[in-house]
Amino acid sequence: MKSYRKELWFNVPTRRAFINITPHVEECLSESGVTEGLVLVNAMHITASVFINDDESGLHQDYEEWLEKLAPHEPVDQYRHNRTGEDNGDAHLKRQVMGREVVVAISEGKLDFGPWEQIFYGEFDGRRRKRVLVKIIGD
Ligand code: ZN
């Protein structure tokens, strides 16, 4: 069995953003040489997500507005977590809703997606360097 590990680094200039990282994961898959197996992709930070959905800008705006209704960034003093001196209480909650990781099957050397599926990095407390782990196992 082959095993492959890589960290993808991001430095999002805004507090929040959604980035399609599918091409990066496909590059990892190509480097790994695995044609049958599994790929795990997870955010390595507790204020960011990795999730799968459609690469459609209206949907991404819907996510942004929905998450902001669920856990508004302001006022920052509404979150007990921010009593630590941070201002990212909302980002921890947004990450929980959008998830930590995805697992995708690898079949015949390709990511075995359903229709329109793409992999996204969801940033909820950006403006600093953060990582995503890609782990691939298989043959
Ligand atoms: Zn925090």
Image (cartoon, rainbow, N blue to C red):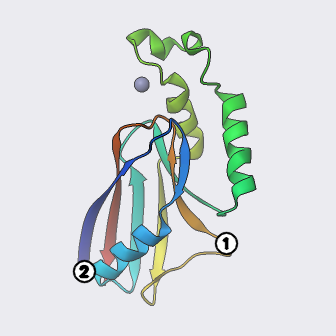
Give the quarter of the figure containing the N terminus. Answer: bottom left
Q: Residues within 10 Å of mark 2 (few under 14, many from 20)?
A: few
Q: State the image coordinates of residue 23 (x, y, percent, origin top left).
A: 46, 71
Q: Earlier in the sequence, mark 1 or mark 2?
A: 2
Left or right relative to 78: residue 108: left
Q: Would you place residue 47 above or below residue 11 in this image?
A: above
Q: Nearer the viewer, residue 38 or 121?
A: 121
Q: State the image coordinates of residue 35 (x, y, percent, origin top left).
A: 38, 86
Q: State the image coordinates of residue 103 (x, y, percent, origin top left).
A: 47, 64
**Residues at circles 1 and 2 in contact by the CB criterion of under 8 Å:** no
Q: Would you place residue 122 above or below residue 124 in this image?
A: below
In this rendering, which labeled residue sits more in front, label 1 or label 2? 1
Left or right relative to 76: residue 70: right
Q: Secondary structure at mark 2?
A: loop
Q: Secondary structure at mark 1?
A: loop
Q: Would you place residue 56 above or below residue 13 in this image?
A: below
- Image quadrant of residue 73? top right
Q: State the image coordinates of residue 91 (x, y, percent, origin top left).
A: 52, 31
Per the image, the residue denoted by label 1 is 116
Q: Amino acid at mark 1?
A: Trp
Q: CA distance from mark 1 to mark 2?
A: 30 Å
Q: Residue at x 39, y 78 (%)?
A: 37
Q: Residue at x 38, y 40 (%)?
A: 45
Per the image, the residue denoted by label 2 is 1
> Looking at the image, in which quadrant does ligand 1 appear?
top left
**Does mark 1 have its CB less than 8 Å from ligand 1?**
no
Q: Residue furthest bottom?
A: 108
Q: Residues within 10 Å of mark 1 (few under 14, many from 20)?
A: few
Q: Amino acid at mark 2?
A: Met
